[in-house]
Image (tube, rainbow, N blue to C red):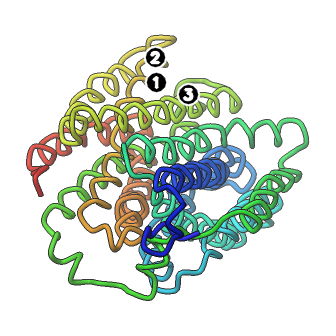
Amino acid sequence: MSTNPASLPADVPISRIDRSTERVGYQALALLSFAHFFIDLYSSGLSSFQPMLVERFGLSLAQAGVLAGMLIFSSSLMQPVYGILSDKLGSRLFTVLAPAMAGVFISSLGVATGYPMLIAMVMLGGMGIASFHPQASANATARIADNKSRWMAVFISSGTFGMAFGPAFYTFLSGHYGLESTWMGAAPGVLVTLLLAAQFQLAPASRETSNHFDVEALKAKRRPLLILFLLVYVRSIVQMVFSQFLPLYLNRERGFSVQSAALGLTLYLASGGLGGFLGGNLADRFGGKRVILISMAGCLPFLALFFLTEGWVALASLAMAGLLLLFTIPVNVVMGQQLVPAQAGTVSALMMGFAWGSAGLVFIPMVGWAADRVGLGTAMAVVSAFPIAGYLLARMIDEDA
C-alpha cells in the first residue's frame, strides 16, 4: 500500500498508515540487523584463523598482514563500488546473496592447500561482505523517521557483536572438529541468504534514488564529508590493527593460549558493540560532535593501560578502550547520510567500508612489517596513539552543516 495520502481511499486513517509504515520499518531493521550479525561474524573469521594458518603454512607476520590486507581490500575498500552499483541498479541481490558468499569462502579457509589459495578465498569471501554493507545500511533505517542514530546504532552494533562472536565461533569449530572442518560454519550464512530472499525488499526511498548517482551532491558537501571520512580513517587504523593482530599479540607476547587469545578479541569487539549502541543513543541527545570528542579522548588512557599493565587490569582496559573507540561508528554513518540523503548507499560505503578498508590496507601490512623488526606489542602501541589526531579533527566538525 502506498503511503502517499493522495493515493488512498478517504476512509483510511493517516495514523494507521503511519503505524503500518513504522512497523514495516522496524521489521526491516530487525531482519537486516540479524543478517549483519552473520556478515560481520564472517568478516572477523580470518583473525581467528591467523594463529593456526601462520603455524600451518609457516607464514611471516608480514605475510599474515598481507593476507589481512587482501580481506580488507575486498570487503571494505571496494564497498563504494557496491554502493554506487546498488544506488544505480536498485537490485536487492547485493544484500540477499552476500551472507552465503561470505560464509562459504571464509569458513573454508581451513581446507586451503597453500598461500595463493588462501588469498583467493579471502578475496571472494570479502566480495560477499562488501556487497552487503552499502545497500543494507541505506535500507536499515530508511522507513524509520525518528532517532536515526539510535536505530542505526542497533544495526551497526549487531554487526560489531557478530564480529566479536566470530573468533569464538571459529575457535570452537576448529577446536572440536579440526581446522579442516570449519567449512561447516558456512551454514548460518546460507540460511540467512534464504531468509533474505524470502523477506527482504528495498525501501521505497531506496528505489526512488536508484538509477541515479549524483556526484555533484557529494561535491557540494565535500568538506564536512572529508572531515567525517578522516575521523573514520583514524579510528579504523586502531580498530583494524587490533582486530587483526590482537590474537597473535596475546598468544605470542602475553602467553595466552590460542583459544584464550580469541576470547580476548571477542571481549574487545563485544565491548565495541556495546559502545556503538551507547554512542548512537548519546548522539541523539547530545550531538554527534560531542560523542566523537569523548570517544577520541576517552579511549587513549585505556589503550595505554592495556600495554602497561597485566592480568585483569589489562583486560578491563582493553574492554573500555574498545567501548569508547567504537562509540562513533553509527554516529559517523548517520551524520554522513544526513549530509547527502539521496546518495545514502554511497555515503555509507565511504564511511563504513572505504575508510576502514583504506586504513587497514595501509596499516595492517605496515604493522606486520614493523612487528617483524621491533615486536608486535611495540608496533601496536604506536598505532594506539592515533586517536590524538582524531580528537583534533573532531574539533573541526560544524554540526550546522
Residue that mark 2 sits on: 316
- Earlier residue among tags 3 and 1: 3
Label 3 to label 1: alpha-carbon separation: 6 Å
Disc 2 element: helix
Looking at the image, do the residues carrying marks 3 and 1 touch, with CB atoms under 8 Å apart?
yes
Disc 3 element: helix
Residue that mark 1 sits on: 319
The residue closer to the viewer here, 151 or 231, is 151
Residue type pointed to by label 2: Ala
Label 2 to label 3: alpha-carbon separation: 9 Å
Residue type pointed to by label 1: Ala
Mark 2 crowdedness (10 Å alpha carbons): few <14, some 14-19, many ≥20:
some
Quadrant location, the C terminus: bottom left
- Earlier residue among tags 2 and 3: 3
Direction top: furthest residue = 312
The residue closer to the viewer here, 47 or 139, is 139
Q: Dividing the picture into quarters, in which one does residue 43 lie?
A: bottom right
Label 2 to label 1: alpha-carbon separation: 5 Å
Q: Dividing the picture into quarters, in which one does residue 230 lie?
A: bottom left
- Taking the spot 83% from the left edge, 36% from the top edge, the residue there is 175
Looking at the image, do the residues carrying marks 2 and 3 touch, with CB atoms under 8 Å apart?
no
Q: Does any portion of residue 322 appear in the rendered image?
A: no
Residue 108 spot, x, y in % from top left: 79, 60
Mark 1 crowdedness (10 Å alpha carbons): few <14, some 14-19, many ≥20:
many
Residue 153 spot, x, y in % from top left: 44, 42
- Taking the spot 34% from the left edge, 27% from the top edge, the residue there is 303
Looking at the image, do the residues carrying marks 2 and 1 touch, with CB atoms under 8 Å apart?
yes
Quadrant location, the N terminus: bottom right
Residue type pointed to by label 3: Leu
